[in-house]
Image (spheres, rainbow, N blue to C red):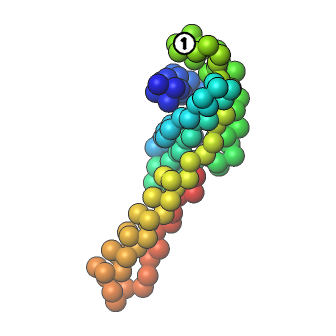
Amino acid sequence: MVQAEISRLLERYRDRLGNWGPGFLLTVTRAEVKRNLESATVFYSWTAGRGPASAGPSTEEVARTLEALIPDLTRELSGRVRFKRMPRIDFRFDPNLAAGDRVYSILENLELERREPQAPRRRVKRREP
């Protein structure tokens, strides 16, 4: 429930997330709310698309931007979700999407080598979140 609501709110605040180019996609991968409602840890990941024009922001830039949105997100969330106590929101980067992207790049390089064994190796640059 918290994950879905925060995802909706982040979509609403998309213009405040920054103009990080075409293909930038922020995803809330999961949210864990402590049993005592003290805090909600929201795990996120992002991708900046492919190609040199889509380098995107650094992980630190995304983290700072999300941290700046916490007061607004908390206020909006309190109006949408009923809790005895509103949990403190804490964003954490989830590296699983980046790891999957790294595996994809390796497989893509292997496929290139298989198709063109006599050609010099061409490395596909992996995206850095």
74 relative position to 122: left or right: right
- Which quadrant of the figure has residue 78? top right
**Residue 108 visible:** yes
Check disc 1 and give the amino acid type. Answer: Arg
**Nearer the observer, 111 or 2:** 2
Q: Residue at x 62, y 21 (%)?
A: 73
Q: Please name the residue shown 42% across and 85% down the image.
A: 120
Question: At 56% from the left edge and 48% from the top edge, which residue is drawn?
Answer: 94
Up/down of 113 relative to 88, above or below: below
* Label 1 Cα crowd, 10 Å radius (few <14 / some 14-19 / many 20+): few
- Outermost residue, bottom side: 118
| Farthest residue, direction top | 79
Q: Nearer the viewer, residue 37 or 111?
A: 37
Q: Residue 119 appears at what percent x and percent y? A: 37, 85
- Quick one: SS at disc 1? loop
Q: Answer above or below: position of 86 versus 20.
A: above
Percent from the top left, x then y, of residue 128? 57, 57
Q: Is residue 13 above or below residue 102?
A: above
* Place of residue 125 in the rendered image (x, y in percent of width and height, measured from the top left): 50, 66
Above/below status of 2 relative to 94: above
Percent of width and height locating residue 6: 53, 26
Q: Residue at x 37, y 76 (%)?
A: 110
- The residue furthest left is 115
Pointer 1 residue = 82
